[in-house]
Image (spheres, grey):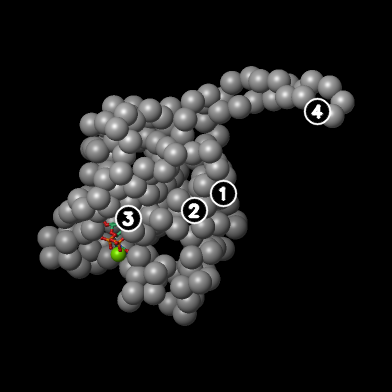
Amino acid sequence: MSLVFESNHPLVKQKVAALRAADTPPPAFRQLVRTLALLLGAEATVDLPIRPTTVRTPLGDAPGLELDGPVAIVPILRAGLGMADGLLDLIPEAQVWHIGLFRDEATLKPTEYYNKLPAHCRARVAMVVDPMLATGGSAVRACEILRDSGIRSIKFLCLIAAPEGIARLSEAMPDVPIHAGAVDDRLTDIGFIYPGLGDAGDRQFATG
Ligand SMILES: O=P(O)(O)OC[C@H]1O[C@H](OP(=O)(O)OP(=O)(O)O)[C@H](O)[C@@H]1O
Ligand SMILES: O=c1cc[nH]c(=O)[nH]1
Ligand SMILES: [Mg+2]
């Protein structure tokens, strides 16, 4: 069974195209990242654990649903921060667990520099967010950190994925679904996604 879900939502496709454009400035880029994360988040949470509840309306009781247990949003710093904002719009009660990883430009391997997971991790589902799934090294490392902390249910959300990253994450974490806004052609010889959008962190935070 394939656990790779490339969105077919027309608004996702339209916004990914705008995100790619080299002349999209950081303020517009950040807004697109946030809205795309919300749209992908809605698609990725159709199986979120819920339980029945009753709410009191001004007229009487109505049946409803509530989340069955905590949800964690796990942004991979720093580019994942903008996606975390969009997911928080969708699930304001979620916890946010930050993991800092940067990719060494020469080796393309992830280096961990920050970890703000709670002392006792308790989440029914943890949603790892990072705009770019390139070699997959950062995504795999983030999922390993969560697994080592006892988290069983993990989802990975990205805006653009390379086939190489999908293959690596699927092999290392076969039970982690991958939700992507687009799946691109390949990696370049310096590890960038082609055609991609460039450096997602620099484009969000105007550091390019
Ligand atoms: O799949 P990979 O080959 O690991 O590459 C993807 C990683 O690279 C980028 O982060 P970067 O290292 O540029 O850090 P930044 O978010 O601080 O810019 C991106 O946001 C991912 O975290
Ligand atoms: O294309 C890429 C690959 C990794 N990280 C990015 O920000 N962009
Ligand atoms: Mg970067």
Q: Nearer the viewer, residue 34 or 115?
A: 115
Q: Is residue 159 visible?
A: no
Element carrying mark 4: loop
Callout 1 amino acid: Asp
Q: Is residue 26 above or below residue 8?
A: below
List the residue tagged with mark 3.
Answer: 77
Q: CA distance from mark 4 to mark 2?
A: 30 Å
- Residue 190 drawn at (x, y percent): 20, 68
Callout 2 amino acid: Asp
Which quarter of the frame holds ligand 3?
A: bottom left
Residue at x 34%, y 47% (from the top left corner) = 98
Residue at x 40%, y 36% (from the top left corner) = 126
List the residue tagged with mark 2.
Answer: 85
List the residue tagged with mark 1.
Answer: 89
List the residue tagged with mark 4.
Answer: 57
Q: Is residue 76 above or below residue 53?
A: below
- Residue 32 drawn at (x, y percent): 52, 63
Q: CA distance from mark 3 to mark 2?
A: 13 Å
Q: How many numbered discs?
A: 4
Q: CA distance from mark 1 to mark 2?
A: 6 Å
Residue at x 37%, y 65% (from the top left corner) = 200
Q: Earlier in the sequence, mark 3 or mark 1?
A: 3
Q: CA distance from mark 4 to mark 3?
A: 41 Å
Compared across the picture, whether 84 is left or right of 202 comes to: right
